[in-house]
């Protein structure tokens, strides 16, 4: 009984801070290419390949997972459209599941993909967080 109470207390205390072990994440990727080209997306981490998807203008692809115990989860995606191929870490636990990072914790991580940059949308409607392509 005592163990159950401790687990319930720990869970409710840490959920709002994004500190829950194995926290659930939902990544959503939206094709916002200004050229209105089809975007080909391929996402994977060390142990899982999410497959290859073609997204028309405005279309989206999503996947769910849980952050690992060491909080080292990374999902890298390649993005291809005519005459371009870019890569980007669409989820990094140190960036997207860390209350001390400049972009904060997201449980639903919504990414708009533009030619110039991938941007993580903000739930409060503020300016999105945009990043440089890795490649």
Image: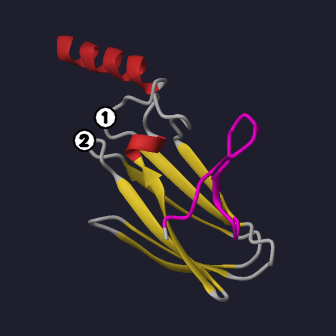
Residue at left 32%, top 18%? 10
Q: Give the class, few, some or many, for how many residues have Cα within 10 Å of label 1's Cα (few <14, many ≥20).
A: some
Q: What is the number of the mark on residue 109?
A: none
Q: Which residue lies under the disc numbered 1?
A: 21
Q: Secondary structure at mark 2?
A: loop
Residue 1 in view, yes or no: no
Magenta part of the chain: 114-134
Q: Give the class, few, some or many, for how many residues have Cα within 10 Å of label 2's Cα (few <14, many ≥20).
A: few
Q: Is residue 63 left or right of residue 111?
A: left
Q: Is residue 27 left or right of residue 114?
A: left
Comparing 88 with 45, the one in front is 88
Q: Earlier in the sequence, mark 2 or mark 1?
A: 1
Q: Position of residue 124 (x, y in %)?
A: 72, 34
Comparing 36 with 117, the one in front is 117
Is 120 within the magenta?
A: yes
Residues marked 2 and 1 touching at CB (< 8 Å): yes
Q: Which residue lies under the disc numbered 2?
A: 69
Q: Does 2 sit above or below residue 104?
A: above
Q: Position of residue 29 (x, y in %)?
A: 61, 62
Residue at left 54%, top 34%? 102
Residue 11 in view, yes or no: yes
Q: Does 90 sit above or below residue 80?
A: above
Comparing 85 with 69, the one in front is 85
Q: CA distance from mark 2 to mark 1?
A: 6 Å
Q: Secondary structure at mark 1?
A: loop
Farthest residue, direction bottom: 83
Residue at left 45%, top 43%? 95
Q: Position of residue 35 (x, y in %)?
A: 80, 78
């Amino acid at each position: 009984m005592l163990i159950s109470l401790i687990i319930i207390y720990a869970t409710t205390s840490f959920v709002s801070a994004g500190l829950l072990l194995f926290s659930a994440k939902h990544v959503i990727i939206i094709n916002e290419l200004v050229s209105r080209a089809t975007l080909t997306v391929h996402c994977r981490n060390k142990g899982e390949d999410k497959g290859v998807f073609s997204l028309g203008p405005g279309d989206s692809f999503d996947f769910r997972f849980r952050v690992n115990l060491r909080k080292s989860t990374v999902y890298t995606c390649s993005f291809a459209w005519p005459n371009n191929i870019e890569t980007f870490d669409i989820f990094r636990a140190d960036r997207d599941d860390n209350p001390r990072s400049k972009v904060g914790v997201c449980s639903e991580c919504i990414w708009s993909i533009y030619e110039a940059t991938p941007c993580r949308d903000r739930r409060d409607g503020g300016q999105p967080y945009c990043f440089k392509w890795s490649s």
